[in-house]
Image (spheres, rainbow, N blue to C red):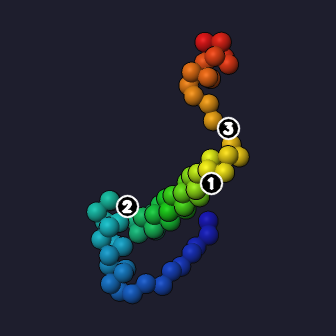
Amino acid sequence: MSVISIRATEEEKELIKTYADFYGVSVSDFVKTSVIERIEDMFDLRSIEEYEKNRKDGSIETYSINDVKKQLGL
């Protein structure tokens, strides 16, 4: 397993430790989970922005639920 270190002020360190303690996890697990969740949020946002751009310029095709049901013979 790799080790990543970050620099933080004493105040930032205490804030992070307080939150980790509140959630009952180690500082390492709290920071790791927070970073991964942030990356996932950024990926989701980028995906939504790309979808909205493509929808706006007409480069994607959407179907209503009724159209899908007809296509599937339901």
Find disc 3 in the rendering and name its residue. 61
54 with respect to 16 (left or right): right
Q: Work out which quarter of the rendered image holds the N terminus and state it.
A: bottom right
Amino acid marked by disc 2: Val
In x, y percent, where is residue 33?
Answer: 47, 60
Q: Are marks 2 and 1 in contact (CB under 8 Å)?
A: no
Find disc 1 in the rendering and name its residue. 53
Q: Is residue 12 visible?
A: yes
Amino acid marked by disc 3: Glu
Q: CA distance from mark 2 to mark 1?
A: 40 Å
Residue at the spot x=32%, y=84% of the render?
Answer: 11
Residue at the spot x=67%, y=46% of the render?
Answer: 58
Which numbered disc, 2 or 3, marks the residue that appears first in the sequence?
A: 2
In x, y percent, where is residue 46?
Answer: 59, 58
Q: Is residue 64 above or below residue 73?
A: below
Question: In the image shown, does 62 or 21 lie closer to the viewer?
Answer: 62
Which numbered disc, 2 or 1, marks the residue that appears first in the sequence?
A: 2
Which numbered disc, 1 or 3, marks the residue that appears first in the sequence?
A: 1
Residue 25: assigned label:
2
Question: In the image shown, does 6 or 63 lie closer to the viewer?
Answer: 63
